[in-house]
Amino acid sequence: MRSYRIIALGAVLALFASCAPKARIEMSVAGAPATKLAVHKLNVSSSDLLDSVKTDAGGSFKYSLPVKKGQPEFVYIYKGDTRLAALLLQAGETAKVTADTLGNFSVEGSAGSAELAGIERAYSDFVRKMAAATEPGEATKLYVGYYRDRLAYVMNNSHSLAVVPVLFQNLAAELPVFSQSTDALIFKAAADSLKSVYPESKYVKALENEAQRRLNNMAIEHAVLNAEQAGFPDISLPNVNAERVSLAGVEAKVILLHFWDVADAEQKLFNVEVLLPVYEKYHSKGLEIYSVGVTADKALWASVIKNQNLPWINVCDGLGTSSRAVALYNLQTLPATILIAGDEISSARIDGEAGLKRELAKLLK
């Protein structure tokens, strides 16, 4: 009886798997009879081999793969090192692809794949023209024209996943087409738009991460450019009343800038056992504490602030380690304590509680 149940369960699972949403590829490759091809699927930052197929005597093959509803997949067909086709497949689609062995292809039956084919053609044409450019300024003119064209494409197709590979195109290795610091705003806008359509897509999540990385870099660049105005990077974060408080706007002889993880018991205890006595002793002498909660759980942070009755400036943007403040101060570990005296970050090395108290005694005599 037990054996029968196992066999029956296996049959049910197999039936369920066979009913899972799929996308299908029907492809014909001119000049490639009885040829082995490779099917790859994009896995955010890498291309993973799914399977190998062999064309028939006429150069054709059929292939199907699971694709979850609402989560289109980027799939690539290769012959050796040559990419024959790039596809963007939705669940239930049948992409009919006509290609040659040089990388030229067209698609019917899959709107996303047909769109991607046009993107690939435009990119290949741009790369070819850049390689052939010889006159002074010609390459710059080509790049500016292509950049503007791709920017218009991204803005006009904000709900299409096809914009993702456009945003990640390169002029050469490690040289992105979208290389300006302000392009972070384009990445952010694209990620926000796509998330409203494909909230579960791994590609959208990767785009969100890249947008945040670029926004952090843009903030750092801005801080460096304004270094003459302030000797430390300024941050402006919301307090428990959702009111933004600027670090540069704090009027104090010494600012103790403290970053901490609200979920860590020892770091919560540090507030009460170390920071509170320090604050009570030195606040009247010119000390202010600007405490940044590094967490995505703002409710927990607000609860800890309230329960501990912390009297200094407490802020949190709810972005956790993706916070602009974390990037600006290049934090590697938590907690982290930085002393700002006047308009400059103190160069003194702070080693634990004793080191902190020693430096405050020097600065606030």
Image: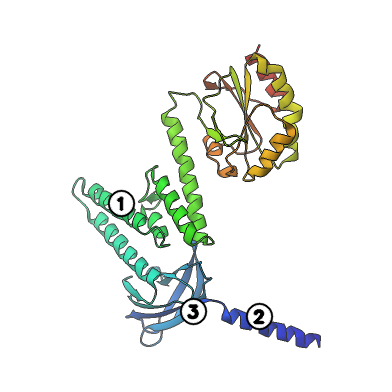
Q: Which residue is mark 2?
A: 13
User: Helix or strand or loop: what does disc 2 sit on?
Assistant: helix
Q: First in sequence: mark 1 or mark 2?
A: 2
Q: Position of residue 152 (x, y in %)?
A: 31, 54
- Position of 20 with respect to 160 (left or right) is right
Q: Which residue is mark 1?
A: 147
Who's the residue at 52% across and 33% down the image?
Answer: 236
Q: Position of residue 35 (x, y in %)?
A: 40, 81
Residue 64, numbered label:
3
Q: Amino acid at mark 2?
A: Leu
Q: Which quadrant is the C terminus positioned in?
A: top right
User: Helix or strand or loop: what does disc 1 sit on?
Assistant: helix
In the rendered image of this protein, does residue 109 appear above or below residue 73?
below
Q: Residue furthest front?
A: 241
Q: Which quadrant is the N terminus positioned in?
A: bottom right
Separation of disc 3 and disc 2 at Cα?
A: 19 Å
Q: Amino acid at mark 3?
A: Ser
- Position of 254 with respect to 216 (left or right) is right
Who's the residue at 66% across and 43% down the image?
Answer: 299
Q: First in sequence: mark 3 or mark 2?
A: 2
Q: Amino acid at mark 1?
A: Tyr
Separation of disc 1 and disc 2 at Cα?
A: 49 Å
Q: Quadrant of residue 252?
A: top right
